[in-house]
Amino acid sequence: MPRRLTGYRPLARFPTFPSHAPTRQLDHILLRGPLGDVIAAQAPELPLSDHRPLVAEVNVLR
């Protein structure tokens, strides 16, 4: 439903919280409009926060 209302689409879907054993996705990467296909995505564990960052590699359209 949010995608239909806003036009934003998620680029990665992973649990991100809590960082030591994530069970919920609190963080998002959203895009509206054309950009390209997601090649890879991950939520790596880093010792910087109580959340895991989301990382998405995108094949940019030209």
Image: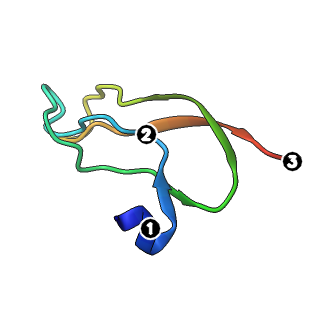
Residue hosting label 1: 4
Q: Position of residue 26 (x, y in %)?
A: 23, 50
The amino acid on which the numbered mark 1 sits, given as a three-letter code, is Arg
x and y, in percent, of residue 45 in the image: 29, 25
Count residues near mark 3 (Cα–Cα under 10 Å), then give few for <14, some for 14-19, many for 20+: few
Residue 55 % position (x, y):
47, 36
Residue on which the image places disc 3 = 62
Give, as a three-letter code, the residue at label 3. Answer: Arg
Quadrant for the N terminus in the image: bottom left
Q: Position of residue 38 (x, y in %)?
A: 59, 35
Point 16% across, 31% down: residue: 22
Q: Is residue 10 above or below residue 7?
A: above
Specify the quadrant of the image occupied by residue 20.
Answer: top left
Circle 2 Cα neighbour tier, 10 Å, few/some/many (<14 / 14–19 / ≥20): some
Q: Which of 41/50 is in front?
A: 41
Circle 2 — which element? Answer: loop
Classify 10 Å Cα crowding around label 1: few (below 14), some (14-19), many (20 and above).
few
